[in-house]
Every structure is written in structure tokens, then in C-alpha cells.
């Protein structure tokens, strides 16, 4: 039996076939507008990466799917990263919002503000053992250099005019991000995302692209949300929809959730040459009983069915990525 959320999702899917819908979708950026949220996300990724193998602040980072907010990338730059590449599928960037966020983030870093925890952001994942500012990674010398007036001004200038090529710009912005011709092989130290990879349709290709772009020994750091994103009332209700019904719900959108489980991401990462060094999993009791699962989900094991979100950190083990990938 369908509930109100299901009917609403079907209606939303149907209207996407109307002329002019694509222009409306481009107004929905989906980025995080809170400086404290972006600060918390970046530092959580950084702390876990450092704990599980990455010794230094990465030189070049790329973020998948930042939406209209570049706050996570700005946090990385204010930590001392040398360059930030933002990859998206639709152009959402809002310079006025991001310039304001830069100033708010600058104050948080100057004050060495503790990482906002689950009290402030109860649904934010991954979790840390402690939320003190990571002085062991971002010590006084590192922060003096990263927050020098000259460098911060260069970030402001780059933010106002983000580059469209991978050059000497501190900030480069690419749409669409999956076009591998825009990005040099073996050029990036870290690729991260927050609640983005559940929206990517071709996951094998995405992980292969990441392997190609990363330097040998580079890292990926991804938080992936397997919940319904409001499409159904139940967190896993989409697993009761057959392929035909899902086609209606998806409609003509450029992206929605891909409905792929945790195990698919692990498989794609390993097949692309990554060594999965650390994962963190958030479990929820499945709402959809096995007898209600659509055909494509009936063979999922209990771990997949109960995994509501995950954090995956992996290292690129390929020596010559460009030579080994087609």
C-alpha cells in the first residue's frame, strides 16, 4: 500500500517530463550552507585519513558533487591544501554565498574551534572518537602558513573567479565532472565526497576515473548515504519499488539515488585497484521485510539491508594508472 510520500514521489517524477523542468532543477544545488557543517565534515575526513595512513595534509584535493557550496573545499584550503578541484554534474556554484562562507570558516580556523559533534549535527557521519581541534595534524606552524593574509587573499581571488582548467589556480570548477578528458591522470592526492556517491549512476566508471586521476598512493574518502532521501517515508522504502515504478519516480532527472548497496561500492573500489583500509558503518533495522523487496534486492544479505550509511577510506595502489586503464 502506498503512502503520501510515495504518491508525492510519483508526482514529482512525472512532472520532470514537462518542458522546462531541467531549468528548475539547476536551481536546486543541494550544497551545505552552514560553515560549521562544512568545517565539521572536512575535519572528520581529515582526522580519519590521518589516523588510518595519510601522514600529511594533501596537496591537491578534489570534491565530488559540492552543489552550490564549496565550504568543504574552502576548509581544506584553509588547512593548507595547495589546490581544490570541484567536480559536479550541474553548475550550481554561488559565488556570493561562498565568499561569505570563506570569512566564517576563516574565523573557525583562527580560533582552532573544536569539531562540531553529534550534539550539533546528530545525523552527520562519519563519527570520531573525539572532537578536539586536531593540533597533531594542523599545528601552529601549519596554520600560520595556511592562514597568512597573503594566502587567504589568494583564496578570495580564486573563489571569485574559479578556473576552468587544472592550472595554477587554487580553485578549479568542472561541470560535468565525469568527463575524464578534463582531468590529468595521476594529478590528485585526495578525492572526497559527502553523501554524493549514492547519486552516481555508473559506479564502476566513477571508481575507475578516481583511480585514474589519483596519484599512486593517493586516497579516496567518501561518506555514502543509503537512506531514501525523502523519496519514501521509510528509510529503505525504495527497495520495495520494482524497476518500472522506479523509472516513474526517477522521471527525467539528471540524477537521483542509484539504489546501489554498500557491497557494490566495496566491489567497485577493489576492482578499480583500491585497497580499502577503513570503513565505518551506521546500521538501522530494515523497515522493508524480505517478502516486500523488489526483485533486484531479494539477494542482498543482511549487512547490505541494514547499512544506512557508510564511510569508506581507500588507497590507490596502482603504479601507472594511465597505462593500465583503457
Image: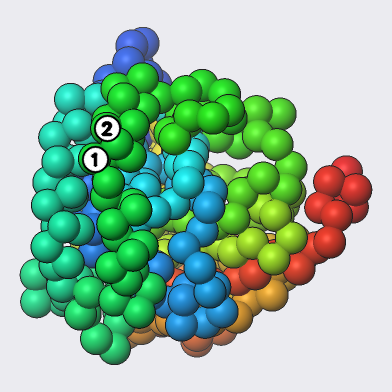
Front one among 162 and 149: 149
Q: Which residue is mark 2?
A: 153
Q: Secondary structure at mark 2?
A: helix
Residue at the spot 36% in from the left edge and 20% down from the top edge: 161
Mark 1, Cα crowd under 10 Å, few <14 / some 14-19 / many 20+, is: few
- Say few, some or many: other residues with alpha carbon within 10 Å of mark 2 (under 14 / 14 to 19 / 20 or more): few
Residue 211 in view (yes/no): yes
Helix, strand or loop at label 1? It is helix
Residue shown at 35%/79% (left/top)?
136
At a point 32% along the width and 71% down the height, the residue shown is: 139
Answer with left or right where residue 242 lies relative to residue 80. Answer: right
In percent of width and height, residue 35 lies at 16, 50
Q: Horizontally, is 263 left or right of 135 in the view?
A: right
Quadrant of the rendered structure where residue 300 is?
Answer: bottom right
Indicate the position of residue 190 as horizontal and vertical percent values. Answer: 55, 57
Do labels 2 and 1 touch, CB within 8 Å?
Answer: yes
* Count of number-bearing discs: 2
- Vertical side of 135 occupied by 214: above or below: above
Residue 18 is situated, as x and y percent measured from the top left of the image, at 35, 16
Q: Residue at x 84, y 61 (%)?
A: 319
- Residue 136, compared with residue 109, is above or below; it is below
Amino acid at each position: 500500500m502506498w503512502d503520501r510520500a510515495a504518491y508525492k514521489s510519483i508526482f514529482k517524477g512525472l512532472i520532470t517530463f514537462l518542458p522546462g523542468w531541467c531549468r528548475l532543477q539547476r536551481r536546486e544545488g543541494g550544497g551545505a550552507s552552514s560553515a560549521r557543517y562544512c568545517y565539521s565534515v572536512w575535519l572528520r575526513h581529515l582526522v580519519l585519513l590521518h589516523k588510518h595512513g595519510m601522514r600529511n595534509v594533501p596537496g591537491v584535493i578534489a570534491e565530488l558533487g559540492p552543489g552550490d557550496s564549496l565550504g568543504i573545499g574552502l576548509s581544506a584550503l584553509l588547512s593548507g591544501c595547495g589546490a581544490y578541484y570541484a567536480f559536479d554534474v550541474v553548475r550550481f556554484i554561488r559565488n556570493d554565498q561562498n565568499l561569505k562562507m570563506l570569512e566564517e570558516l576563516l574565523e573557525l580556523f583562527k580560533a582552532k574551534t573544536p569539531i562540531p559533534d553529534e550534539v550539533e549535527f546528530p545525523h552527520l557521519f562519519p563519527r570520531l572518537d573525539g572532537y578536539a581541534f586536531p593540533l597533531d595534524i594542523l599545528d601552529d606552524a601549519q596554520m600560520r602558513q595556511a592562514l597568512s593574509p597573503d594566502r587567504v587573499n589568494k583564496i578570495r581571488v580564486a573563489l571569485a573567479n574559479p578556473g576552468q582548467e587544472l592550472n595554477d589556480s587554487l580553485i578549479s570548477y568542472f561541470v560535468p565532472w565525469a568527463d575524464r578528458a578534463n582531468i590529468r591522470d595521476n594529478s590528485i592526492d585526495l578525492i572526497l565526497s559527502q553523501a554524493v556517491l549514492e547519486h552516481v549512476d555508473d559506479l564502476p566508471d566513477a571508481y575507475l576515473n578516481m583511480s585514474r586521476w589519483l596519484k599512486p598512493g593517493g586516497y579516496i574518502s567518501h561518506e555514502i548515504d543509503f537512506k531514501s532521501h525523502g523519496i519514501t517515508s521509510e528509510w529503505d522504502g525504495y527497495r520495495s519499488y520494482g524497476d518500472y515504478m522506479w523509472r516513474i519516480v526517477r522521471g527525467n532527472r539528471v540524477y537521483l539515488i542509484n539504489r546501489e548497496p554498500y557491497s557494490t561500492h566495496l566491489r567497485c573500489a577493489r576492482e578499480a585497484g583500491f585497497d580499502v583500509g577503513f570503513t565505518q558503518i551506521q546500521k538501522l533495522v530494515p523497515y522493508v521485510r524480505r517478502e516486500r523487496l523488489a526483485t533486484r534486492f531479494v539477494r542482498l544479505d543482511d549487512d547490505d539491508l541494514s547499512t544506512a550509511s557508510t564511510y569508506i577510506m581507500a588507497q590507490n595502489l596502482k603504479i601507472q594508472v594511465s597505462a593500465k586503464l583503457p
